[in-house]
Structures are given as structure tokens and as C-alpha cells.
Amino acid sequence: MVKQADEWLRAMILSFYAEALATAAAKRIDGPVAHQLALLETASLVSGQAGRHVGEEEVARVLLDASRRRRVQRAAATPQRPRYRVARVP
């Protein structure tokens, strides 16, 4: 069972991370360095808002979970082709 506080924290992490990536892009920082900086900044900002320590590991876990959810939803939304051919009867 997911608590409402966990969903609030998850939404906050995702929004702060997107903002941190946009800030890094504005500073012309890209690649793994941008992701690492965004991860650190997100953990710092969320810790202040949540009133408790939120580490980089927790932020990374939420980001990976969100990525996994998007991938599953995308896979469920795309129609699957049959893996075999149906023989035509003359």
C-alpha cells in the first residue's frame, strides 16, 4: 500500500529532477555530469521540503521506478504483432 506522503514525495522528486535537468541544460552541461548534478540538487531540495534527509539513492530509486512505469505503459499501449504467420487456405 502506497501512502499519500510517498506519492507527494515521488511527485516532488520527479518535478525537481526535471527542473534540475533543465537548469543543467541551460548551463550547457550535458551527459552523465548533468544527471549527477541534477540528482544531487534534487536530493538537497527535496530534503528541505520533506523535513527529513532524502539521499541520492532514494532519488535514484524513484527515478528508476518512474522510468520502469513509463516503459511498461508504453509497451502496453503499443499493439503487438503476432509472432507467427497464419496460413491462408485457398
Image: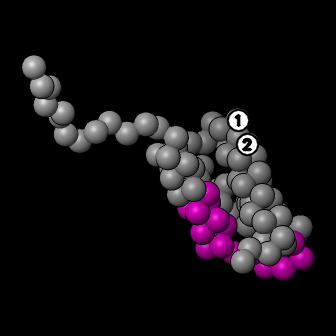
How much space separates mark 2 and mark 1, taking CA atoms?
Answer: 5 Å
Q: Are marks 2 and 1 in contact (CB under 8 Å)?
A: yes
SS at badge 2:
helix
Q: How is this picture coloured?
A: one colour
Residue at numbered disc 1: 26
Residue at image point 61% right, 73% down:
57
Which quarter of the figure is the C terminus placed in? top left
Residue type at mark 1: give it: Ala
Is residue 54 among what the camera can see?
yes
Could you tell me residue 14's position as x and y percent?
72, 55
* Up-down relation of residue 42 to residue 75 (above or below): below
Which quarter of the figure is the N terminus placed in? bottom right
Of residues 79 and 60, the one nearer the viewer is: 79
Residue at image point 19% right, 39% down:
84
Of residues 83 and 63, the one nearer the viewer is: 83
Of residues 82 and 23, the one nearer the viewer is: 82
Q: Which residues are magenta?
A: 50-66
Could you tell me residue 83's position as x and y percent?
23, 41
Residue type at mark 2: give it: Thr
SS at badge 1:
helix
Q: Is residue 6 magenta?
A: no
Residue at numbered disc 2: 23
Q: Residue furthest top?
A: 90
Other-residue count near label 2 (Cα within 10 Å), few / some / many at <14 / 14–19 / ≥20: some
> Would residue 51 appear left or right of 86 to someone viewing this image?
right
Type of secondary structure dominating the magenta stretch: helix
